[in-house]
Image (cartoon, rainbow, N blue to C red):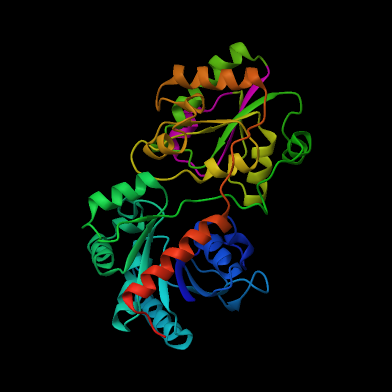
Amino acid sequence: MRVLVLSKRHSGCSGLTGERGYRSFELPEALAGLGHQVRGIALSYQRRPQFESARLKPDGAVWDSINGFPYSLIGARRHLRYIAETLGLFNPDIVWATSDAWQLYAGGRVAKSLGVPYVVDFSEDYETSNIGRLPGLASLLRRAYKDASGVTANGQALAEFVSGHYPRKEAGVQIIGDAATPYFFQPYSQGSARSMLGLPMRATLIGTAGKLTADYDIETLCRASPVLKERHPSLKLVLAGPRDESLKKLLHEDIIDLGILTQQRLALLFRALDVGVICGRRQGHDSPRDYHEMLASGLPFVAAETEEVLHLLETVPECRYVRGDMESLVERVDALLNIRRRGDLPAATWDERAQALQQFLSQVKDVAGGPE
């Protein structure tokens, strides 16, 4: 099967290595590993080095990266033209568009005009993202969804939201969840990881990585750490990730702020901690990628009870806490610290996810009657 993938570019690195770990890169790479011909166009919304026909590995997907700004008429036209030219040369059986509202619209517009079936992928609720709030883009997203031959979504909660928020599809929404990248996330010496990050060797470390913002309820975790320190005197809270102004007033002397980490250093952090915490977004239906990454690292963790977490950890209530409830968080973390046992839940792999995506794309292609 020949698959054209449309996504945004996530990393500021000059090549493909910075894209590792992201759904929009790992799933196409895993599809190529299953024997499919996969071509990807990664659009950068910032000025970065562009490239053509790049591969991360000999049997991997072939990637082009161009700079473009969809809120600019010139940038939007350039991207649409590039997709059309690539589609004509590559002659795909199907198009899979992911990452944000613009990618879904752009892929749908070109694929439909050329009679190629296309599938839209929701990695999150795109209408609440920055680019999804651009004037008119929500209506273009709805048009792309309406005309799509199939729909995939990152997790059960998001699939249920998409099914209810947009007109129902006869085939429904196929769940293709996130996974962890073994290249980064695997069990490792805790002492070595702490040494490489400059973290205290003998301290009890809890922590989180991701968006350190008000809507992700980082406040509950920061307020919980002094209470936990009364029970575990050597405790330190380690934070990493992009943040907003709300974090400044929450910082205290027992917080170690590592800033924004690369994927490699994020993996080290998950090996260095004693307990991880996944803070839940106040609104939204996102699937927490760090859930899979902590599992793959063997890190015990607790997660705020979002809709998706309730699905993922339905049978493991001891790993969930009530979102926004400091006492609930303290009790769950304290229990894990007292057990002192590394996690043993199975972690999903991108190869497993790609097998499910392969089957769904093949079904959509056959029903839609893609090019021979």
Is 216 located above or below residue 139 in the figure? above
Query: Residue 220's spot in the image, x, y percent?
Result: 45, 25
Residue 45 seen anywhere in this rendered image of the structure: no
Tell me the residue at 55%/44% (across/down). Answer: 292
> In the figure, residue 17 lies in which quadrant?
bottom right
Q: Is residue 349 above or below residue 364?
A: above
Horizontal side of residue 108 vs 27, given as left or right: left
| Percent coordinates x, y for residue 43 in the rendering | 46, 69
Q: Is residue 320 magenta?
A: no
Q: In the picture shown, does residue 332 fall above or below 122?
A: above
Residue 340 pos. (x, y %): 67, 23
Q: Nearer the viewer, residue 211 or 360?
A: 360
Please tell me which residue lies in front, 117 or 230.
117
Which residue: 30% across, 57% down?
A: 172
Write the start and end of the magenta stretch as one range.
234-252
- Classify residue 173 as left or right of residue 355: left
Residue at the far top in the pictured view: 230
Q: Position of residue 54 (x, y in %)?
A: 61, 75
Residue at image location 43% in from the left, 34% down from the top = 246
Q: Quick check: 40 left or right of 230?
A: left
Q: In this rendering, is residue 246 above or below 89?
A: above
Q: Quadrant of residue 368?
A: bottom left
Is 241 one of the magenta-colored residues?
Answer: yes
* 311 with respect to 202 (left or right): left
The C terminus sits in image quarter = bottom left
